[in-house]
Image: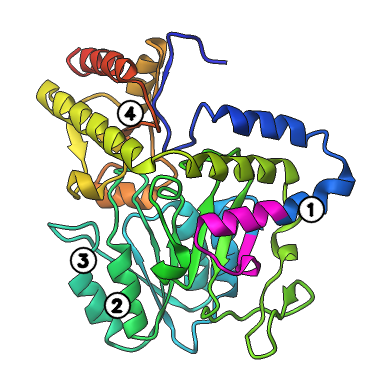
Amino acid sequence: MMSQQEIYLNHAGTSWPKPKIVVDTVRDAMTRSPSQWDEHFSQARHAIAEFFGILNPELLLLTPGCTSSIAVAIGDVDLGGRHRVLTSAWEHHAMHRPLLKLADAGVTVEYVPPSEESSLDLNHLEDQLSKGDVGLVAITASANVTGDLLPFEAVIELAHRHDAQVLLDAAQVVGWLDLDFAALGADLIAFGGHKGLQGPWGIGGLYVSDHARLNCSGASCELPQADRPLRPGYCDVGSVDQVALAGLHAAVGWLNRIDRSVHMDLAREQIGHMEVVLKDAGARCYGIERPSRRMPSLAFSVDDRPSAELAASLRTLGILVGSGLQCSPLAHQTLGTASDGLVRISVGMGQASHEIQAAIEAIRGQVTT
């Protein structure tokens, strides 16, 4: 357990502390009678589906997390005879690794670069889509290193205009952004429960829209409607963790009772203030998008200070941040920071202002040392 003096600033990794109702619900679920499991599973899945605007809960596959969700999506997606997949230069390795396996199987995987103004060059994307041989666009909603939001709404529209499917990794944005999955229109959306959703580890989901094209066969698949293609069944990723699911159910209920836009505005303001201070102190900050198009994260480096060393020094002062490659070596290759990585600060919902100020003083002291 953290002491009173420690300040947690790694919410892009996992949120902490969890809301009390989540902690209490997880504890209670540990002793729940097996006779109640089916009922609570159904209630939780319906509540989570409703939170994301999913009208049919059968389209929500519950998984152990976002990594599992992405693996199922990429493993089952039907490219419709097309041989190219487009992705971004910012992907978490949970997306990048299964895409590389597609490449090993003969699919051409290509990267849409950023532009000077945006984290993804939409003109380049449209040019590639217009060739007519792209079966899937698989991108993250937000770069987990820098916090930059990708223009995923525009990506979905462009891809569908050219009959390509879209897989969206929403791990960094769920909970923070008010997303209606059905209205958003992506074919497949993967998410985890332990970051902005405020849930525990071990639970996530994959939204499989009713227009997604999948190539799934065998006993683990189900046919919800006679005129629809086979879809992943719950056996694809093993038994759902009932305890973690109970926690996520409680978490989305808690999120429904707060004004998330207020929390986002404050968190972005806090990160913006920290960025100004760090730049003034001589740190190099990374990111392309304007503050309104970024998550409340900040990646930075200091000359001649490896990120792991700097993060370790901050830990001795009670400031807990992320460091290294943030599970996204591809993004660091794009940034040119693959050798030492970066320090990443990410604030949480309702982060106290006095914690931000204390962290600023500690970090500024390390940057100017």
Range shown magenta:
43-61
Residue 175 location (% of width, % of height): 45, 46
For marks 4 and 1 on the same chain, the one whose residue lies earlier in the sequence: 1
Residue at 24% x, 50% y: name it. 293
Check disc 3 and report its element: helix, strand or loop: loop
When asked about the image quadrant of residue 108, the answer is bottom left
What is the spatial separation of the Cα atoms under label 2 and label 4, in whole angstroms? 38 Å
When asked about the image quadrant of residue 287, the answer is top left
The amino acid on which the numbered mark 1 sits, given as a three-letter code, is Glu
Marks 2,1: beta carbons within 8 A:
no
Marks 3,4: beta carbons within 8 A:
no
The amino acid on which the numbered mark 2 sits, given as a three-letter code, is Leu
Check disc 4 and report its element: helix, strand or loop: helix
Taking the magenta stretch, the answer to whether it contains residue 52 is yes
Residue at 39% x, 28% y: name it. 350
What is the spatial separation of the Cα atoms under label 4 and label 1, in whole angstroms? 47 Å
Residue annotated with mark 1: 39
What is the spatial separation of the Cα atoms under label 3 and label 4, in whole angstroms? 29 Å
Q: Quadrant of the C terminus?
A: top left
For marks 2 and 1 on the same chain, the one whose residue lies earlier in the sequence: 1
Residue annotated with mark 4: 307
Residue at 26% x, 74% y: name it. 125
Residue 205: tell me if it is visible.
Answer: no
For marks 2 and 3 on the same chain, the one whose residue lies earlier in the sequence: 3
Q: Which mark is residue 121?
A: 3
Residue annotated with mark 2: 158
What is the spatial separation of the Cα atoms under label 2 and label 1, in whole angstroms? 41 Å
Q: Nearer the viewer, residue 85 or 100?
A: 85
Check disc 2 and report its element: helix, strand or loop: helix
Nearer the camera: disc 2 or disc 4? 2
What is the spatial separation of the Cα atoms under label 2 and label 3, in whole angstroms? 12 Å
Q: Which mark is residue 184?
A: none
